[in-house]
Amino acid sequence: MRGADGYQSPFAAESTAGALVDAADGTVLGWTAAARDMLGIDAAEVCGRPARDLLADPSQWPAVLAQRDGPAWIGRATLRHGDLGELEVDFRVLPLDDGGLPGGQPLPGAGPAGARRMIVLGAPTSLVTKWRQDHAFTQELFLQNRIGLAVFDDDLRLLRTNSHLLPYGGVPEDLTGFRMEDLLQPEDAHSINEHLRDVLRTGVPRFGLETRVRTLDDFGDGRVMMFTAFRLQESGQPPLGVTIAFTDMTDFDRARRRLEVLHRSTVALGGSLSVTRITEDLAGVLVPSLADAAAIDITTAVLSGEEPAPEHDRPGALRRTATAGDVPGPPGADAGPQARAPISAPLRAGGGHLGTVTVWRGPQRPPFDEENRSLLQEIASRAALAVDNARRYTREHRAAVSLQRSLLPPAASDTVAAQTDSIYLPTDAASGVGGDWFDVIPLSSARVAFVVGDVVGHGLQATATMGRLRTAVRALADLDVDPEELLLHLDDLVSQLTVEALGDPDEPEDPDRREHSPPEAVGATCLYAVYDPVSRTCVLASAGHPPPAVARPDGSVEYVELNPGPPLGVGGLPFEPVEFQVERGSVLALFTDGLVDGGGADLDEGMADLRTRLLKADVLRRPLKDVGRDVTAGLAPGRLPDDVTLLLARTRTVEPQDTASWQLAADPQEVARARQLVAGQLARWGLDEMVFATELVVSELVTNAVRYAGGPVGLRLIRAGVLICEVSDPSSTQPRMRRALATEEGGRGLFLVAQVSSRWGSRYTRSGKTIWSEQPFPEEPAPGRAL
């Protein structure tokens, strides 16, 4: 008999060697064909000769006999082989009962038990060992209970199981001979039987089959079981039956559904700053995920943006803001007979009572349990925060919002690419802000963007425009466009702001608006620079803004030669980029014109004076904060003709040994090579813990590039603060992450990349696009902490 993997059982007739041996003198009396095939020795060479001559070393005969422990015994010996020289064999000795003479006398020459001949069965030790291992594995598999096992015959009757098939009430203890329809509700039994019959018919295993099962007396949610089924069959024989391995996934399924409801609720709660819209979206999630009907009631004070009543006080009047499903009645009404299971949870935030969320279930669903109550309370807690945020927004939206210095970023920053510090001196010292701004924006692939800008004018209008432009630059920088393209978009925005400020000339002028904020054109200058610490290059473009100064390691300070474009809002003219090499340890100084043309001095003289001040401040060696203070010394806020901004950036580099890049062909086989290259590089960097996640990222991105973009495909790793993985291809089509349907085989690549990455994105290049992802390095254990 052959097993499923094709090897013969040591007890199969066609594979077991046999010999008939005289019990008295050990002479071989008979020799089977299987013995001839096993040892390559014909019967004529063996019969009539002592069995010891079969040993590879006949002197070991006493050692072989020493294994005997009774009339029937087993042992192991090394026999000679006609072709191989020798073969290790496991054998079994079975004495033959030859009967005896009348009166019970033994035959002449018979042993003490009346046996004068023995049958010796043997098989190669390797075959016997494998069979014993398989037998032990099967035996131990049925002894464990972590994974359930059940064996069915070809008529789908249960033959054997290692644990209770359905571990809850309503199922007999002994299930031998039962069918699924004897235990489960008809639709559940039919579903499982269909899969088992298909496995029996085709022989194709089923893996990870998840189904809900309910016993005949269970009309609730039942249990969620995951089955893996495969057919039992010997070579050339009809199927013996089917075996299933099953796991109770009920707790996991409940947790998954809970997380799904929480996730959908969180998304719904974050989609609006309107109290009514938030509650409507939430009710739509609760039904039917958790209940058959839902209602949300909010206090009238919250709806008007006022502070809610303290929780210990009597709640104010409630207004029903959202419902879903067949809600029984108005707020406070009792549930009717068609909604027999209602539960509710209060909305509390900051010690105040905001409202109540109530859900109902009809008789066709099981009543709420403690887990459902806990879930509703969690949702209500998150909803309360969202409602309170919306209330605060409503209140703040009704008041005038004064733009403060908080519109500007922190004065100092520290990134992989550069360390920065800044000085900002507004003309209007009372408000603390003006029309100047600066920013330091981390970009993909360890790069950083430096921004300085200057809005024409002063006061609240210039401040508001500054805030809008800085936000726009941040948004455009997130798209990772080139500096000249960013300024082009920003120029279009300023033009639109001018149209909005001046209004439609055909409309009648509003006298109130003319009195309080006379319309005026919006204008600004801006310098946008992108520094790459890997290539040590800086690319910048200017919209009417003065060039930056570069302090080089040799002690010189020079201004970057550029051809500035027109100020923002003029339109119609291009912006020209300039690229220059940045030496290790250089310092960039970006500024607004208020620093170099204050008091009506000549611009060239002001820039020469700034260069001198940078040299005197020892910009290369001293802390940037001290340098900025010295450079702007003598400039008093509030008495300046224009706002002054100075941004200093001490550049850093990413060493060549911290990068690795490869070119791949547009071949699906290159995906495996890409994984190998990445794994090898991470091993050389000592980042073995990141191999699995990075291989996943590379596999998904390279596969997409090969499949949709063609080649060549560029792959680059950068070790700079985080692990950066880049995949470049010649296509200009931007990828998008979507939610794949359960029936779709693909569409989850970017979703997986997002799950294992702290940040990811895509940027256009001159030859196509680059998709990148960032992963944080594994945290090192604290000193003295056990690993």
Image: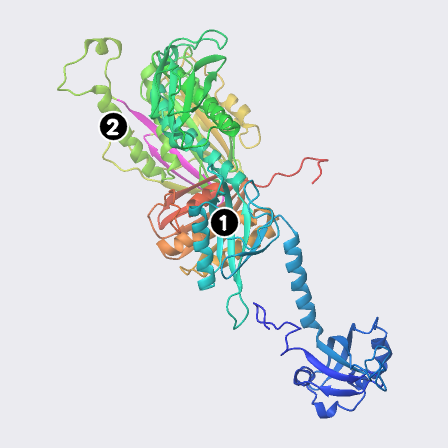
Question: The residue under label 1 is which amino acid type?
Answer: Asp
Foreground residue among 503 and 669: 669
Quadrant including the C terminus = top right
Question: The residue under label 2 is which amino acid type?
Answer: Ser
What secondary structure is the magenta-colored segment mainly? strand
Please tell me whether mark 1 or mark 2 is closer to you in this view: 1
Image-quadrant location for residue 591: top left
- Cα separation, mark 1 vs mark 2, equals 77 Å
Q: Which mark is residue 309?
A: none
Q: Is mark 1 on a helix, strand or loop?
A: helix
> Residue 235 in the image: x percent, y percent?
54, 71
- Relative side of 537 to 621, left or right: left
Foreground residue among 777 and 186: 186
The residue lying at 22 percent from left, 9 percent from top is 512
Q: Which residue lies furthest to the top in this view?
A: 313
- Which residue is the site of mark 1? 182
Q: Which residue lies furthest to the front in this view?
A: 103
Quadrant including the N terminus = bottom right
> Residue 147 in the image: x percent, y percent?
59, 49
Please tell me whether residue 538 belongs to the stretch shown in magenta.
yes
Q: Residue furthest left?
A: 506
- Which residue is the site of mark 2? 495
The residue lying at 44 percent from left, 59 percent from top is 198
Mark 2 nearby-residue class (10 Å; few <14, some 14–19, many ≥20) = some
Region in magenta:
522-544
**Residue 536 visible in the picture:** no
Q: In the rendered image of this protein, does residue 549 appear above or below residue 713?
A: above
Mark 1 nearby-residue class (10 Å; few <14, some 14–19, many ≥20) = some
Quick check: marks 1 and 2 in contact, CB under 8 Å? no
Mark 1 or mark 2, which has the lower sequence index?
A: 1
Foreground residue among 737 and 176: 176
- Relative side of 161 to 343, left or right: right
